[in-house]
Image (tube, rainbow, N blue to C red):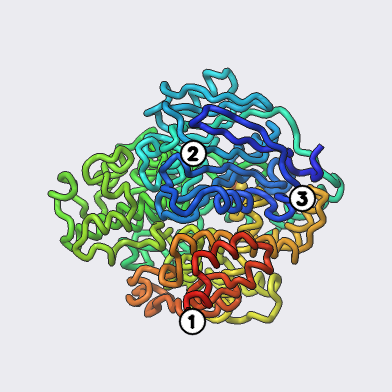
Amino acid sequence: MFKYRGYAGKYLRADLTRGTTTPFDLEAGRCEKWLGGNGWGAEILFSEVPVATDPLAPANKIIFATGPINGTLMPNSGRLECISKSPLTGIYGDSNAGGFFAPEMKFAGWDMFIIEGRADHPVYLMIEDDRVEIRDARHLWGKDTIETEHLIQAENGDDQIKVACIGPAGENQVRFACIQVTPQRSLGRGGLGAVMGSKNLKAIAVRGHGTVPIAQPERFYDIAVKCHEGIRANAIYPAVSRYGTPGIVSLMNKIGRFPTRNFQSGHYEKADNINAETLREGYFVKDIACYACPIACDKIYRVREGEFAGTTVRSFEYETLGGYGASIDNDDLPSIMKATDRTDRLGMDVISAGRAISFAYELWEKGILTSEDTDGLDLTWGNYHSMLELIEKIARRDGFGATLAEGVRRAAAIIGKGSDYYAMHVKGQEIAAQDGRAQQSMGLAHATSNRGADHLKAFPTIDETGYPDEARRRYGERYLPEIADPHANKHKAFLVKDGEELGAVVDSSGNCKSGGTFVLAQIYWDEMAEAISAATGMEVDAAALKRIGERIYNLQRAYNVLHGISRLDDTLPKRLLTEPSPSMSAKGQVCRLEPMLAEYYELRGWDESGCPSEAKLLELGLEDAASRLKAAGKFASARRE
Ligand code: SF4
């Protein structure tokens, strides 16, 4: 039996080139040093995927990993972590999804799948408890993600099989292709679906019949109940549960943080037509929850009449309403639902797809693109028929769609004519519907995220709309009032660093950041430490977990530094740094990144170029990273010589 409970105790390597699958015993040291999901993936990528590796080459690896909390009674304990070198950014990449796949991995007796090589024809992995097979998937190639899931369940006669699969976009290696996970949750960011496509891996299907062992069941039950009760008692729980993430449309619109017409503004004048109340009133069918989640932020919505009648969507989020709504000046909800359904079925990240489309619409407005460039499509703001057409063309790399399928950074390089100014990305990854001019910490979070533009790594919520009580509860008086002020710069480096490290730990534990940790703020360092200790029997306190989070974040950064990432890349599109927001309470604000970045590097123990110092890496037990950075001449001392 494995030393620590909470884990299944073994992982799988599947070499698709050789057609082999090999089980390995999980190493106790791997758990002590990296905890799980996010940490394991970072460590494997760093040590096994060399810097020169093309993300779409067989030498890249893709890792599906759980954590010690997955599949337990802890609230929101169904999250799956996926790590690979990103075809979108060319650096460290990861993505995280809810649903039921990760708990099913644990029930089948697996903590992690490491996929290597490339099959010579489409295949899928079928895993039922100890039995692992690489199966022919030629009959699934070309199918959309929902068809693929249902076909795999049907041909195995078991509708409880959980599936992680790609759609046509992943097969066509669209650089922001996603992986869809039962039931229609997304490993959205970073183009990891394209990595699966490059390996001819259509899907991984898993079914398990076991349970997750718990070291101290009564102690674990107590902390799980405390967190459940805390979530339900939180003042905003009823709204979060009733509306899910669309509930913040009106809130973000009010503070000028809801990107409109490709970030020209942060306030959408027609937002009432696409806000949560309108959505609920006209289209709601039922609430859906991920594994063990008391929040159920997911919903099913249906269009009942009109051009898109019959369209049914789930995982319909704030980001979708931003990307396919405000960002292209489209207040037609049924068309946004149709666009979301098509994007999910084709297997693309809605954030990147929406941003690529709004980029093209702005280039049309500015006269940089004409119908000769767009295969005859009219990209006038609000034209949702062209939006729907573009989604299909991107997924199939058809005509102008092939340019947008490269992501906005590469698309701008192809289009030229000054179009790069309108490409809203950081390190090649498109920015979500979060305007860093209206919330300074969000600007910093986008700039420093190890996977390129991202609102979920640091997940700053304390200063979204001012949240002083939560700030006081978490940090005491020390950082108030600035930490809860969205327009202040002071202490935002601390907020972002703390969030990045907590996020790395939560993503390594198998829990959901959106649920109890950041939005409802009930699971912080102490609660996480208590849950992990009781589940595993590996006693960790908040300080030990913080160290794990810091170690993970520094290793990811070291990997990126080896890829040439530096302070020059920790930035934002010029628009957010120089064009004052015209919107609401953010009016006149730009993101004042530089002072926050300087404070952030200092807190992290990184030099002024953004490279972790040798002392910091050694302090965190990252000797290998220290020696590789030294050999590559990345430390400040070497640069001065
Ligand atoms: S809060 Fe939402 S995303 Fe998180 S586990 Fe619950 S239903 Fe899933």
CA gap between label 3 and label 1 equals 40 Å
Secondary structure category for the residue under label 3:
helix
Residue kind at label 1, given as amino acid type: Pro
* Closer to viewer: mark 2 or mark 1: 1
Residue at label 1? 595
Secondary structure category for the residue under label 2:
strand
Secondary structure category for the residue under label 1:
helix
Q: Residue at x 64, y 62 (%)?
A: 622
* Closer to viewer: mark 3 or mark 2: 2
Frontmost residue, 496 versus 624? 624
Residue kind at label 2, given as amino acid type: Gln
Residue at label 3? 224
**Could you tell me residue 441's position as x and y percent?**
51, 72
**Would residue 220 appear left or right of 86 to someone viewing this image?**
right
Q: Residue at x 56, y 64 (%)?
A: 458
Residue at label 2? 180
CA gap between label 3 and label 2 equals 28 Å
Q: How many marks?
A: 3
Q: Residue at x 34, y 77 (%)?
A: 578
Frontmost residue, 225 versus 187? 187
Residue kind at label 3, given as amino acid type: Ala
